[in-house]
């Protein structure tokens, strides 16, 4: 079902990349270049690609554009590590962060020492906010919405899509 939208987008017309108006997904990249994100996602697969950092009111303009186009059903918020997978190595519950190897890498210049006699540039993973991490169901290999199943005084996390348990 395609809704006819005459004056769309309502805001930031010059700062958006318009795609296939028959699709139902809008992509909002945070600091990534919108042309780069559009190349990765494919402009034919989405309605519009735009950035959150704008000269206007930011998220309010994006929400107004989404509400003005009834064919858009969801917004994908993309960053530099969007779509990458890994296993959680360490959890920092007080900071609401997790450490995932090879994700959110930054470079650190190190003086020479006993472990690194030459010195140089070392790549280290930084902790990532838990809100940016989703659980992937091992059975259906999709991002899982988590549900709980209580049996025999044991609470088990399950995937809401395929109903398979997530815990070992």
Image (cartoon, rainbow, N blue to C red):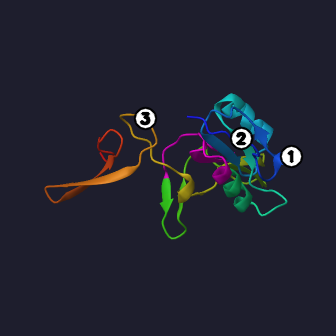
Q: Quadrant of residue 161?
A: top left
How far apart, in angstroms, are the residues tagged by discs 2 and 1? 12 Å
Q: Nearer the viewer, residue 57 or 168?
A: 57
Q: Which residue in the protein does label 1 denote?
A: 14
N-term-proximal mark, 2 vs 1: 1
Answer with mark 2 or mark 3, whichever residue precedes in sequence.
2
Magenta segment: 66-89
Q: Which residue is mark 2?
A: 48
Across and down, in percent, residue 107 comes to 74, 50
Q: Is residue 73 magenta?
A: yes
Q: Residue at x 43, y 34 (%)?
A: 141
Determine which residue is flagged by label 3: 141
Say which of marks 1 and 3 sits in front.
Answer: 1
Separation of marks 2 and 3 at Cα, in angstroms: 27 Å
1 or 3: tag closer to the N-terminus:
1
In this view, the residue in front, 126 or 14, is 14
Task: Report the side of 51 relative to 70 (left or right).
Answer: right
Q: Residue at x 77, y 37 (%)?
A: 36
């Amino acid at each position: 079902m395609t809704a006819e939208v005459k004056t769309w987008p309502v805001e930031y017309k010059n700062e958006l990349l318009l795609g296939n108006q028959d699709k139902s997904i809008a992509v909002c990249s945070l600091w990534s270049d919108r042309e780069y994100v559009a190349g990765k996602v494919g402009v034919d697969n989405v309605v519009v690609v735009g950035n959150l950092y704008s000269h206007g009111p930011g998220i309010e303009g994006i929400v107004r554009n989404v509400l003005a186009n009834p064919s858009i059903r969801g917004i994908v918020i993309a960053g530099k590590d969007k779509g990458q997978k890994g296993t959680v190595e360490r959890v920092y519950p007080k900071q609401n962060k997790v450490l995932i190897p090879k994700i959110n890498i930054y470079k650190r210049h190190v003086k020479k020492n006993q472990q690194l006699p030459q010195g140089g540039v070392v790549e280290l993973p930084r902790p990532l906010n838990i809100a940016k991490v989703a659980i992937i169901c091992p059975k259906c290999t999709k991002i899982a919405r988590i549900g709980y199943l209580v049996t025999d005084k044991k609470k088990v996390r399950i995937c809401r899509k395929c109903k398979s348990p997530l815990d070992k």
